[in-house]
């Protein structure tokens, strides 16, 4: 494995390999519970806790876990943390739990978490594994908040609904686009975000080509000749 | 326990169309995005799903009756462990007794273990308080619903291969927007049982 600096370990998950927007992992919670900002935040917090806890345990125990049963062990550790967060949320925030409680147990099968354990925490020192978990969770939170904010503002015309900071964004006469807070809105929002990112990448690539055009022309002609 | 045929049919149809697992609850999106490029693979994935869902539903009911009343905090852990080992056993059995079927299902069977639709089914049928028979119909409905969504998506994507899509939209963005449109169409079914 290539050696990386601690900063790289952290930053990679936040943007370059953003779990939702780039790798398309963990789509189920990202689409299902992002109808308000509060729900998105709660889900991100739960995922952060599970990711940190399981990374800590797996990275600490990596020498003890037999290679053949490693995946089952990871799933058991993850499921334990999910149970903790499930019960804590149920006790501390019953109103949020009513909205997203159905989807909390499904954090177990969020491929993003298992992916980080298999690819990173099981091979690296504890500190690095925690940094990586923090970065990945931050990337997940960014994506969740992007979707949650957009869907809530457009779909109900409010921001921070169900909290004490709730306010109307467009004033009382706004007719909300109810479809954005219902399931199709989730697909549409993520779809448009991905289309935008695709367009942005294409544009950047084109600009780079123009800036270095004599060089790029030489490279392409050499390739064609070969 | 005492449910008429009509109630069971209602459970089946509403799990299949109204609260479609893929298009309404966003469960099982990984296979929905990953293997929906061809109708045939999509159909096979759907069949494997129906199969595993039916077994999972029975086992979840069993756990609910005999194990979980004594230790409710074990719900998530016991479901995932039992599902994972069950899929392994089923896989080995099929490999031994019907190599043809094993080749047909191929990689999809083990993949299903980490499919959130299965864990969701087990957990939600518990939450809804379904008995063995209810759960079975719920699982069948959910399985057929997932298959329907997969096959619809695959058919659209096969058509998409032949059409001139702008380069920007050749990633998953377009697939997600098509899924949104499908989901919009499925929302129409929610008026089916209100009266």
Image (tube, rainbow, N blue to C red):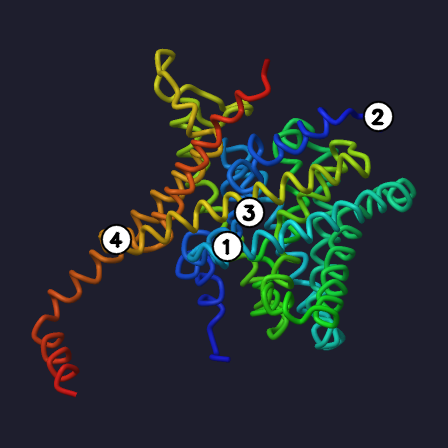
Horizontal side of A165 relative to A224 (left or right) equals right
| Residue B168: mark | 4
Q: Disc 4: which chain?
A: B
Could you confirm whether marks 4 and 2 are on the same chain?
yes
| Looking at the image, residue A123 lies above or below residue A31 | below
Residue found at x 63% / y 49%? A107
**Dot 1: chain letter:** B
Residue pointed to by mark 2: B2
Question: Quick one: SS at disc 2?
Answer: loop
The residue that mark 1 highlights is: B42
Q: From mark 4 to mark 2, how far is it between C-alphas?
A: 55 Å
Q: Are marks 1 and 2 in contact (CB under 8 Å)?
A: no
Closer-to-camera residue (A164/A74):
A74
Where, quadrant-wise, is the C terminus of chain B in this rendering? top right
**How packed is label 2: few (under 14 Cα within 10 Å), some, or many (20 or more)?**
few
Q: Quadrant of residue A146?
A: top left
In the image, residue A100 sits, relative to residue A49, either above or below, namely above
Secondary structure under the numbered disc 1 in the rendered image: helix
């Amino acid at each position: 494995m290539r050696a990386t600096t601690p900063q790289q370990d952290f930053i990679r998950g936040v943007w370059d390999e953003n779990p939702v927007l780039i790798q398309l992992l963990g789509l189920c919670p990202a689409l299902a519970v992002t109808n308000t900002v509060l729900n998105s935040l709660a889900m991100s917090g739960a995922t952060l806790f599970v990711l940190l806890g399981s990374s800590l345990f797996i990275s600490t125990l990596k020498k003890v876990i037999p290679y053949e049963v490693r995946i089952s062990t990871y799933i058991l550790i993850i499921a334990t943390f999910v149970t903790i967060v499930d019960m804590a949320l149920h006790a501390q925030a019953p109103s949020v739990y009513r909205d997203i409680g159905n989807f909390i147990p499904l954090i177990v099968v969020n491929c993003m978490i298992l992916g980080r354990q298999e690819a990173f925490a099981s091979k690296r020192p504890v500190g690095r594994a925690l940094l990586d978990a923090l970065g990945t969770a931050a990337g997940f939170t960014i994506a969740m908040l992007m979707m949650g904010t957009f869907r809530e503002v457009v779909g109900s015309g409010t921001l921070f609904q169900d909290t004490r900071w709730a306010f109307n964004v467009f004033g009382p006469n706004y007719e909300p686009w109810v479809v954005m807070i219902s399931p199709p809105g989730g697909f549409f929002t993520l779809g448009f975000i991905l289309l935008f990112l695709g367009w942005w990448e294409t544009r950047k690539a084109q600009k780079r080509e123009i800036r270095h055009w004599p060089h790029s022309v030489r490279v392409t002609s050499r390739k064609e000749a070969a | 326990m005492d449910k008429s045929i009509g109630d069971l049919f209602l459970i089946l149809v509403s799990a299949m169309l109204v609260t479609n697992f893929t298009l309404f609850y966003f469960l099982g999106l990984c296979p929905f995005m990953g293997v929906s490029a061809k109708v045939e693979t999509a159909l096979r994935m759907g069949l494997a799903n129906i199969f595993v869902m039916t077994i999972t539903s029975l086992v979840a009911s069993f756990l609910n009756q005999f194990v979980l009343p004594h230790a409710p905090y074990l719900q998530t852990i016991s479901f995932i462990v039992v599902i994972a080992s069950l899929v392994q056993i089923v896989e080995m059995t099929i490999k031994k007794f019907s190599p043809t079927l094993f080749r047909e299902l191929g990689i999809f069977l083990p993949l299903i273990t980490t499919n959130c639709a299965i864990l969701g089914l087990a957990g939600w049928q518990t939450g809804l308080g379904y008995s063995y028979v209810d759960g079975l119909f719920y699982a069948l409905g959910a399985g057929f619903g997932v298959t329907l969504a997969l096959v619809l998506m695959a058919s659209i994507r096969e058509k998409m291969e032949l059409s001139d899509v702008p380069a920007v939209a050749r990633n998953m963005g377009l697939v997600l927007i098509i899924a949104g449109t499908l989901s919009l169409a499925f929302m129409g079914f929610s008026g089916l049982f209100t009266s």
